[in-house]
Image (cartoon, coloured by chain):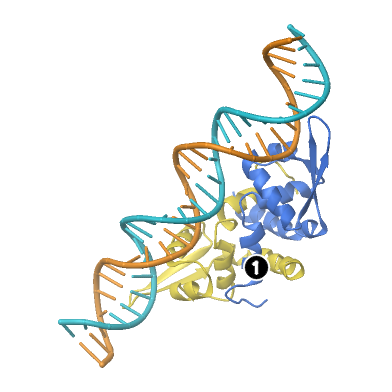
Chain colours: A blue, B yellow, C orange, D cyan
Amino acid sequence: MQVPRKCIVTQAMEEILGKKWAVSILLQLLSGPKRFCQLEEDTDASGRLLSERLKELEAAGMVTRTIYPEVPPRVVYELTEKGKDVEPIIEQIYGWASKWLR
Amino acid sequence: MQVPRKCIVTQAMEEILGKKWAVSILLQLLSGPKRFCQLEEDTDASGRLLSERLKELEAAGMVTRTIYPEVPPRVVYELTEKGKDVEPIIEQIYGWASKWLR
DNA sequence: ATAGTTTAGTTACACAAAGTAAGTGAATAG
DNA sequence: CTATTCACTTACTTTGTGTAACTAAACTAT
């Protein structure tokens, strides 16, 4: 692992993983597709931030957004391959946190 | 891995890893103890934020701070066991980023 | 007919975090 | 006497986040 000033690890944190609620959202989606309101319940992100973050995750190619044109509307978010591939990262965070956080 | 609303993964992100520049600082320290000015050069964090973040990392038991009372002063930061233990997390981020970021 | 419910948002505003630049102290060098 | 070095602070601006209220559109109950 090379460690230049602007390394790819820092880039990943700045652009995606370090944004508030991003990892929490990805974690919830690892267990399968979820609706907007489910994500609101399962994370502590407010609707405003959840909406903003999901837009960014979609733009980054981490999640897909599917609208079912019903009333009331139903929108389902699902991980792409790129999104599913964060699982080992989250597993390592889980392992570390289990060991070191009270 | 259980995924409750307030899970330990989210806690780790909120309290430590998700804070701006925290992962970049830890990454630099993985290659050995570093002085304040080295960290300023090796990350894009400004002195103000670097100082603030290092204080928090010290309070979290991730790094130790050693002052050599010389003039000009020399202060060396080093990872604790808890800090060194983030290496597998950072390795996974590196692997993911190498695969998915341009 | 009118009012209330639901979902997936958006808008407006307050406050907290981060970026930027300049300043500090204390010893040494010129 | 002035300049330099390091590890910070301080002051100020800009950006990000939290909170709450609002929206459309169709269905349901009164």
Residue at point 55% right, 76% down? Answer: B32
Residue at point 63% right, 64% down? Answer: B86
Q: Whole-percent x and y of residue B25? A: 54, 67
Q: Is residue C1 above or below residue D13?
A: above
Q: Is residue C30 above or below residue A91?
A: below
Hey, which quadrant is residue B28 in on the image?
bottom right
Disc 1 marks a residue whose amino acid type is: Val
Give the left or right position of residue D29, taking residue B66 as reference.
right
Q: Is residue B79 above or below residue A71?
A: below
- Report whether residue A46 is seen: no
Disc 1 crowd, CA 10 A, few/some/many (<14, 14-19, 20+)? many
Give the left or right position of residue A48, taking residue D14 as reference.
right
Residue at point 74% right, 39% down? Answer: A36
Give the left or right position of residue B85, taking residue A59 as reference.
left
- Residue at image mark 1: A9
Residue closer to the observer: A102 or A28 = A28
